[in-house]
Amino acid sequence: MIQDPTRHPEASAAVDLAALRADFPALDQRVHGRPLVYLDNAATALKPNVVIEAVTQSLARDCANIHRAVHTLSARATEQYEGSRETVRRFFGVRETAEVIFVRGATEGINLVAHSWGREHVGRGDEVLITGLEHHSNIVPWQHLCDSVGATLKIVPVQDDGDVSLDAFSRALSARTRLVAVTQASNALGTILPVEQIVRLAHEGGAAVLVDGAQGAPHLGTDVQRLGCDFYVASAHKLYGPTGVGVLLGRRERLEEMSPYQTGGDMIRSVTFEKTLYAELPHCFEAGTPNIAGVVGFGAALRYLEAIGFDVLGRHEQELLGYGTQLLRGMRGVRLIGTAPRKIGVLSFLVDGIHPHDLGTMLDTEGVAIRTGHHCAQPLMERFGVPATARVSLGLYNTRDELSAFARALVKAQEFFGR
Ligand code: PLP
């Protein structure tokens, strides 16, 4: 696995696309009579057969609650659930499975940290630092925390090309910064942030760091020990896994200084009416029956990605990103937003005289699925003075032909709107 595919832009993709695409049944369909061109991977990625089969097997055969019973089905379900935890540990380079907490997704992971760690370690007059690139999921929980405890939310500004400079970061850090929460890669513009350096700077100043890996994890081989962050969150559904499941990865030292986020069954060692003793990590943060089939499917998705390898995947996506950028740059009336030197496969753009929503609707009639709107990043849209953009976001199964089909559909939309 590699940390940054943009270091290898010249390498040619060595991915067997036909074989890989055959793994994704959703690709084999027509939309409005046209072959589906799915370019909305930043919202959610399509699922390979191995994930669908793992979820089906979990629901159809190994259907039992975990951790509690002695019977065979429960033992199997527990083994698979805990097996996924080990897969997550290996995939993200986590030290031990105790540091892997299953949650509903990146959003819940961030809320968990804001509620448990935040309320105990951020106080009146302190600062929480985020960037202007963040998804609402990495803004609102911190805003809510700051409002509750009397802290200040500070924002590192975004440059005109959609990048965030380390200098700007250093300037925004202060002796009162308790936590830095940054995205690994922007869902709206694709910018890859220099997270390793940001973590180093934050730690020098004594602040903890949460990395929102919702968009980074599917595109960049991520080793959390190398990143050095205190907390890392990701969502399975953007990693070709099921919805409703994700992870919070936390350093043991940090997790041990946190109270449980939710309480109830499965997170306890013993309960009396006078006192409850909580379970060990990670179970003390997993109250109630979890999304067992989802976790099992998540493990299958990560093993699928491991088998392809982020070197292959990264080269393919970077090659496509280059091609897509070139196509859009060559089109009249198209303005790209987000041209940072290091990007994941995201192309945000505007077309003169066509509202992004109208464009999205027109492209859908050609079988092309793109995202339009504020991408849950309204402050970022405001920074660029636009209410919305159209966004192409690439996945491992996308092809140059699909990008060409997208470009043809875009020209057709321009003609339709007389542009
Ligand atoms: N952070 C980023 C950068 C995202 O792109 C998203 C989802 O699009 C999230 C957080 C939230 O992820 P989820 O809705 O899976 O919790």
Image (cartoon, rainbow, N blue to C red):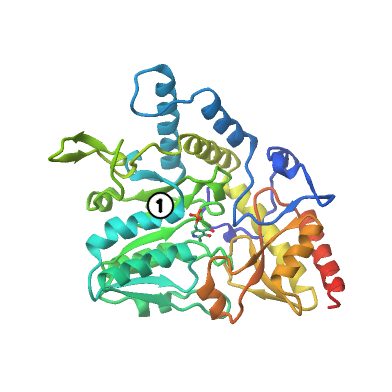
**Front one among 32 and 188:** 32
In this picture, residue 414 sits left or right of residue 254: right
343 in relation to 13, above or below = below
- The residue at the far left in this view is 274
Count of marks, rendered view: 1
306 in relation to 35, above or below = above
For the point 80% across and 67% down, the residue is 410
**Front one among 58 and 208:** 58
In this picture, residue 269 sits left or right of residue 129: left
120 in relation to 297, above or below = below
For the point 41% across and 23% down, the residue is 74
Displayed quadrant of residue 343 = bottom right
| Residue 85 percent location from the top left of the image | 41, 37
Amino acid carrying label 1: it is: Val
Displayed quadrant of residue 189 = bottom right
Does the image show residue 197? no
Task: For ligand 1, tell me if the residue under mark 1 lies within 8 Å.
Answer: no
Does the image show residue 94? yes
Q: Which residue is mark 1?
A: 224
| Residue 381 percent location from the top left of the image | 57, 75
For the point 47% across and 56% down, the residue is 213
For the point 56% across and 63% down, the residue is 187
Secondary structure type for disc 1: helix
| Residue 332 percent location from the top left of the image | 80, 77
Few, some or many C-alpha atoms within 10 Å of disc 1 (few <14, some 14-19, many ≥20)? many
| Residue 37 percent location from the top left of the image | 75, 53
